[in-house]
Amino acid sequence: MRCLVISPTPTHPQDAGNRQRIHALLSALRSFGHRVDFAFVQREAVSDEAIEAMRAAWDRLFLIPYDRTREVPSLGETFAIDDWFPPALETAVAAIAKAESYDLVLVEYVFLSRALELFPPGTLRVLDTHDVFADRHHRLRALGLPVVFFHTTPEEEARGLNRANLVLAIQDDERQLLEEVTTSPVVTLGFLPAMEPKPIAPHEGLRIGYLGSANPLNGHALTRFIEALDADALVSAGASLHVAGGATRYAGPARPGIVPLGGVGEPADFYEWLDLAVNPHEGGTGLKIKTVEALAHGRPIIGTAEAFRGLGAQAAFHAAPDAAATAALARRWATEPRFRYEVARESAALATRYARAVRRQLAPFRSREALERLIDRPRALLVTDVPFWRESLGNQARITAMLRVARGEMDVDALFLGEVGPEDEAAVTHILGRRGRLLSSPGGSEGRVAGPVPPHARLTNFERQHFDAAHFEACEAVLAEGSHAIVVIEYIRLSWLRHARPSPPLRVLDTHDIMSLRSRNFEHFGRQHFLRISLLEELSILSGFEQVLAIQETEHALLRDALPGRSLLVPHTMADLTPADTSRRVRRIVFVGGDSPMNRDGLRWFIEQVWPAVADLGVELHIAGQVCKAVEALRAPDVQLHGEVENLPDFLDAADIGINPVFYGGGLKIKTVEYLCRGLPSVLTEEGAFGLHDGEGQAYLIARSRAEYVAHLRRLIRDPMWRLRIGEGAFRFGRAHFGQAVAQAAFRTLSFIARAAAADPGAARAA
C-alpha cells in the first residue's frame, strides 16, 4: 500500500510518548512492505537533525508550515473540531492529495480530521485518536490542573470521528467511549516499544525510579506520591527513589531517600540500573507510555489503575486507587522480598500478554484487504425478553457486559420482545454504541400468542410451551432485511426462534445456565424451577444451533463434550475496578441478592446458623436487594437491610468481606464475580463457587459446613495479613477469568465463523 501519515507531532526524536507511538506505528507499516510518506504539520519546533532523521526514516517527507496563533476557540471556552485546521493547512494538504495517489491516509489526532475529507473516494481514511478530547478541559479542571492542548465538545468530536472509515483508540476503555458517539467502526491499537530488556546493572541498595516529562499531570501525581512515601522508611530498608526527566522539578532538592537526576540520555540508560519503576498517575486519559516503556525495558513496575488502564493488568499492585496507595506499595516492595518477587513475575507476565495483544491488533495493517474486513464488520441480531439496559439484576448485567464486548468485533442490533420507550432507546445507545439499533416486538395485546406454528418450525414439546407467534413474526420481519450474519438468542426459553426465516448463516444460543441441570438441582432440595426440561431435550435443542455460549467453565466442558466444536466460553465480564482496601478494620460483611428461593434459603440459614458465631467480633451484616423482604422477620442483631440500593457499586465499595451462602441453584453467581473483581475477600458455599476453578484458598474460601463457614469468617475478620492475601488473590482471579479478554476471544471467533459462512453457506457448521 501507498500510505500517507499526516501528523502535528514529529516522529523524531522519540523523547515523548506520543512521538514513540507514532514512530512505532509507521515503522510497523514499513515492516509490512508498505510505502510510508510523512506529512509533518509543523506545530512543534524541532531541530534540523530531527528533520533529517525523519527524511531518512520515511519514503518521503512533507513539511507543512503551521501558525499556532490561529488556534482560537470558536465555541466560547472550547474549540470546534476544525479550529486547529486553518485555511493554509487545508490548501497544503489538498495539494498533496491532488499530486499523489494513496491507498491509505492516516491522520494523527481528531483535530486534524478535516484532512481526511480532502482525499478522493476509494482512499482508506484512518484516524488515530491518541486520546478522548471531548470535555477534556472539564476533567483537567476537576483535578486542579491547567488546561493545555486541544479540547472540544462531544458533538464536535463525534463530527471529526465520523469522517474516518476506521477509528483507532489506544486502549479498550477509550474504544468503548468513542463507540458511543461515532458511527465509524472503532478498534483498539495499543503500543509497546520494541526493546531488548537488559539485565539490571550492579549497584548498591534498591533503586526505585520515576521517569517523566514536566507536564502538570505528572507533577500532580509525583508530588502526591513523594508526600506519602516516607523517605526515612525507604532509607531504613536500603532503598531510594530516583526521579529523572523534566519531572525532576517536582521532586524538590536532593535528600536522604530522594535523588533528583534531571535529564538522562536515553531511557534505557535510566532503566538499566533500576530495580523498580513506579507510575502514580492520577486522572487523565490515554495510554500511559511511561508504564509500557518500563514494561518494554523488562523492569518490574507498580502504579495506579490509571497508569495501567488498557494494558490488561491483573494484579492489585497494578491497580492502586491513587498516588498515596502507590507509595504504600513502594514501601512494601522495599521491605518484603516475597512481594518483590511477585511484582517482578507479574510485570513480566503482563509485558508478554500486552505485547501479544498489540501484535494481534497490528496484524490487519499488513494489507488493504485485511483493513477492509476490519471496517466491513458482520452484523448480529440479539433477541431477548430481558430489559438488559436496566442493569439491576444479574441476567441484565450479563447481557449488557456481553454486548459491550461484542460490539468491538461486530455491529449489534437488539430485538426486545416487549414494549420499549424513548428513555429505553437512549440507555441502549450506551450499550450498543452508535452503530447498533434497538428494535422491539410488543407481541400480542393479550399476552402470548400460542399459534399457529409455521409448518417448517419443528418444535420440541418444551418449545411449543413457550412459542409466541407474534414475536416469531416480528423476528422474521427483522431477519428479512438480510443484513444480519448472526442471530444470538438469549435463554433456551426463546430457542423456538431458531426456526425464524430467512435464517442467518450463524445461529447462536446464549445459555446463561444449562436449565435441565438447574431444574434437577432445585428438585434435589424440594424446590420447583420455573423452567422444566430434560437434559436429552435440552441437548437436542442446542444441537440445532451452530454455536452455543457457556457462561462458566464447568458448563463449557459439558457442552464441549456433548456438542464438539460448538461451545464457546463467554464468561460474565466486568469493567476494571480498583481493589478493595483490605487493610482497614473489618466492619461490613455484605450479601446482595434478588428474591429467589436459593437466595432466601441460603441467607436464612446463614443468619440463623452462622451469624450468631461471628457477630461478637464487632462486625455488621449488610444485605441489599429484594431478598431483604424475606428476612425482615428474623430480626438478628447487627443486621442491616438496605433493600434495593440506588448505587450498588458504592454499596460494594464500602464492603470488607462478601458472602454467598446459597446451597442450590446452578449457574455462575454474578454476585460472586463482583466480589472477585473488586478484590473483596469472600466466603462461599460450593454452590456459591460453582463454575470457579483453581482459586480455592487463594482467591476465595469455600465452606462445606457451618463450622467451616464460621472458621473462615472469624479468621478473615481477625487476621489482616490473611485478608490481604485472599483479597489480592481474588482481584487477580477476577481480572484473569472475568476481564474482557476471554469474552473478546469468543466474539472474534464468532466474527470469523460469520465471515466464513458469508463466503460459503456451509462453512458455519464446518468452522
Image (cartoon, rainbow, N blue to C red):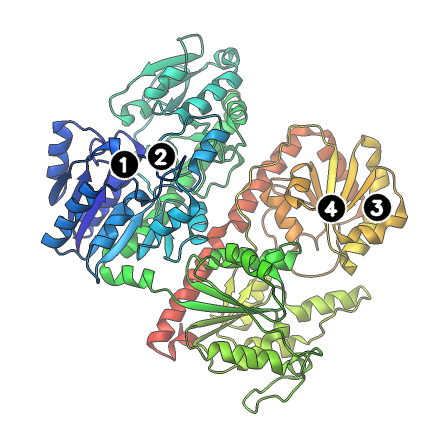
Tell me the tag on residue 607: 3
Identify the secondary structure beneath mark 4.
strand
Label 4 Cα crowd, 10 Å radius (few <14 / some 14-19 / many 20+)? many
- Residue 345 appearing in the image: no
Labels 4 & 2 near each other (Cβ < 8 A)? no
Mark positioned earlier in the residue sequence (1 or 3): 1
Labels 4 & 1 near each other (Cβ < 8 A)? no
Mark positioned earlier in the residue sequence (4 or 3): 4
Identify the secondary structure beneath mark 1.
helix
Residue 659's x, y, as percent?
72, 45
Q: Which residue is mark 4?
A: 591
Q: Which residue is mark 2?
A: 289
Answer with the quarter of the image where residue 67 lies.
Answer: top left
Residue drawn at (45%, 44%) of the image = 312
Disc 2 versus disc 3: distance between alpha carbons? 50 Å
Q: Which residue is mark 1?
A: 20
**Front tag of 2 and 3:** 2
Disc 1 versus disc 3: distance between alpha carbons? 58 Å
Tell whether 293 sits left or right of 679. Answer: left
Q: Classify 725 as above or below 427.
A: above
**Front tag of 4 and 1:** 1
Label 3 Cα crowd, 10 Å radius (few <14 / some 14-19 / many 20+)? some
Residue 523's x, y, as percent?
78, 68
Residue 251's x, y, as percent?
41, 15
**What amino acid is at disc 3?**
Ile
